Image (tube, rainbow, N blue to C red):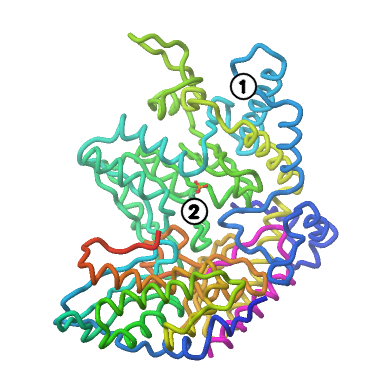
Amino acid sequence: MSDLRDLYQEVILDHNKNPRNFRAMDDADRKADGFNPLCGDKVTLFVRLDGDVIADVSFQGSGCAISTASASMMTQVLVGKTLAQAEALFDAFHDVVTGDPTHAADTSAVGKLAVFAGVREYPTRVKCATLVWHTLKSALKGEQDPVTTE
Amino acid sequence: MRVVSDAYSPDTLQELRGRFDVDKIREDFPILDQQIHGKRLVYLDNAASTQKPRAVIDAETLFMARDYANIHRGVHELSQRATEAYESVRGRVRRFINAEHDRQIVFVRGTTEGINLVAHGIGKTILGPGDEILITHMEHHSNIVPWQMVCEERGAKLRVAPINEAGELDLAELEKLITERTRLVALVHVSNALGTINPVEEIIRFAHEKGVPVLLDGAQAVAHAKVDVRALGADFYVFSSHKLYGPTGVGVLYASGDWLDRLPPYQGGGDMISSVSFEKTIYNKPPFKFEAGTPNITGVVGFGAAIDYVEDIGFRTIEAYERLLLNEATERLREVDGVRLIGTAREKAGVLSFVIDGVHPHDVGTILDQDGIAIRAGHHCAQPVMERFGVPATARASFAFYNTREEIDKLVRGVRKVREVFA
Ligand SMILES: Cc1ncc(COP(=O)(O)O)c(C=O)c1O
């Protein structure tokens, strides 16, 4: 049986309680909405670009601890990354949370986002962790329709 | 819904013991006897769907093993047996809800299809531009969206009767909203999100005084108390087998009087016709007019067994026992700091919606699941209710007669544990 603390790590609980970069952004270059119709999680993501470098990211919305912490930590790690680096991080993060739960995740490429490795043992919670990342992808592509997890 | 007579109204679980042996009942439900994440399963998601007794599982299996064939059209023995089995359930449903005639009972896929069938028919007959359909703020999406669709199609308006902080209808407001423009009132008998039992007899009375028919969504009502459609005076009553210990894919639409003659068919196809030519098709009589195509024959047979099973226990016992469970769970959860109940109506069925300070219901659901406790976390297909109470979602524990006090204990301990994890 998996330990609840694998999922609800202290760092995750902290970001849930005090989400970083939790604000609207007036001068955002990109903005996208993400929505999980199953549980009602909602996120709005704001991105400011400096050429092809991410200069600032912020979010608003409501969701569970996993989705809130995922959004909060994502906004921290993205600042200063190029678009290509952000894309690569998306892929690496996706692998960490969706990989085979009977194997330990390879977290070498995701830095402090490794705290989300426990999510792979909770298949019903994977979408909570990835919602904001899908929303990011949509924002960077400049898509108009809201992202949904379904 | 006050079915427990004065002659029999036990106030404690102890008093009920002897009449009702929950351990024995649990043995009838094979699924309950298992471990989830190493803990004994505590199934508290009964408002979403109930588990199935052995009697239902066996009825389906035996039917398929011995009597199965398509119905209504074969001259051979098996087709006759299958037809008899299927049609006999129609009779049982009629008695179960005390309808007058078998022909008033239409088998559908579930509550959702039943409501869609009526909405479609109302849209094609009595609903015109500027007319109104009245629903309430506590409806399930399945009693909102079909009306929105048909109102849009016909240029009619959807009106919504408000609810108060306890999750009860404001009857005075509701009465005012029934006007000469109102063509139908559609409301939930028992709310799946709040547990509220609505005073539907009274509502039907004043709707009828103004000549307005009423549809009741009985999805959450039929498993918990005796429903008598004639005593209620309902024009339409819809419910699902799967919330009544029966299989999925089967539901019932009851319509009073000659409503089924007046409404047009919902789908075209086999079995719903008397004769077909390319020039003209003559429709079959109700209820067959509304049962196009091969229905869920095996499911209907299983549903019949579910009705027998529930009637065998009896609604006096079921209602009394579930009320005691609800009261106990309500009191115990109220004692936990940081827990807020959503839905505190005076008349409630076995549904406990709640939120915990600083914890999203989704996280509550995951933590309880690790202890083998199955509850629901989400908007319960009732987003307007969530918005009314200013929450994105709730955690919901919902009870059936196979639940126990020990399980309530585990629920309360689980909720305390959630508070600890998020402390
Ligand atoms: C009050 C209410 N109405 C309608 C429905 C829809 O029932 P079904 O999904 O069986 O069609 C449900 C079940 O989720 C319900 O609780």
Q: Residue at x 47, y 60 (%)?
A: B380
**Does dot 1 land on a helix, a strand or a loop?**
loop
Say if residue B186 shows up in the picture: yes
| Tag 2: amino acid | Pro
| Label 1 near ligand 1 (CB < 8 Å) | no
Q: Residue at x 59, y 26 (%)?
A: B102
> Mark 2 vs mark 1: same chain?
yes
Residue contact between numbered discs 2 and 1, judged by CB atoms under 8 Å: no
Locate residue B260 relative to residue B297 in the image: left or right.
left
Q: Residue at x 24, y 35 (%)?
A: B128
Q: Which residue is mark 2?
A: B199
In which quarter of the view is residue A44 placed?
A: bottom left
**Does dot 2 land on a helix, a strand or a loop?**
loop
Residue B338, placed above or below residue A43: below
Q: Dot 1 surroundings within 10 Å: few (below 14), some, or many (20 or more)?
A: many
Which chain does the residue under circle 2 lie in? B
Kindly report which numbered mark, 2 or 1, lies closer to the viewer in this rendering. 1
The picture places residue B418, in percent across and down from the top left corner, at: 58, 82
The picture places residue B43, in percent across and down from the top left corner, at: 66, 63
The picture places residue B385, in percent across and down from the top left corner, at: 40, 63
Residue B279, placed above or below residue B287: above
Q: Which residue is mark 1?
A: B71
Which chain does the residue under circle 1 lie in? B
In which quarter of the view is residue B22 placed?
A: bottom right
In which quarter of the view is residue B152 placed?
A: top left
Q: Residue furthest right?
A: B18
Q: Which residues are magenta?
A: B394-423
Q: Nearer the viewer, residue B53 or B363?
A: B363
| Magenta stretch contains residue B118 | no
Q: CA distance from mark 2 to mark 1?
A: 40 Å
Q: Nearer the viewer, residue B110 or B166?
A: B110
The picture places residue B133, in percent across and down from the top left corner, at: 31, 44
